[in-house]
Image (tube, rainbow, N blue to C red):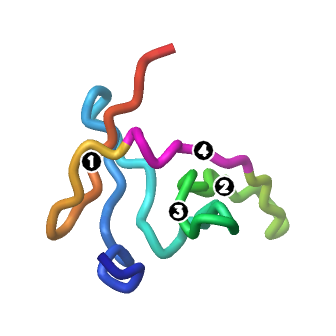
Amino acid sequence: MRLSELSGKEIVNYKKAERLGVLGQTDLEIDESTGHINTLIIPNGKWFRVGRQTTSEIRVPWHYIRTIGTDMIILDVPED
């Protein structure tokens, strides 16, 4: 699968029925030696007054991906 085919898909945690973001607004952590994707890095920003933005991120290991569908990427994230 090409990265361009993943772009624009909703990222959903199925256990919480929670939308985490859209791939394309996320970063990927890639192992330089193998070329494998290790982690999805999903920004979780909140806007405050005067245009300031504080940003945290959600890091999702690639092996948490349960299914990649036509419109969504479904994650199986263990509850901590």
Magenta span: 56-64
Q: Earlier in the sequence, mark 4 or mark 2?
A: 2
Cβ atoms at labels 4 and 1 below 8 Å apart: no
Q: Considering only vertical position in the picture, is 24 above or below 36? A: below
Q: The residue under label 3 is which amino acid type?
A: His
Q: Earlier in the sequence, mark 2 or mark 1?
A: 2
Q: The residue under label 4 is which amino acid type?
A: Ile
Question: Pointer 4: what residue?
Answer: 58
Disc number lying in front (4 or 3): 3
- Residue at image position (23%, 58%) is 68
- Residue at image position (35%, 81%) is 2
SS of the residue at dot 1? strand
Q: The residue under label 1 is which amino acid type?
A: Ile
Is residue 58 part of the magenta span, yes or no?
Answer: yes
Q: Earlier in the sequence, mark 4 or mark 1?
A: 4
Q: How many marks?
A: 4
CA gap between label 2 and label 3 equals 27 Å
Disc number lying in front (4 or 2): 4
Dot label at residue 45: 2
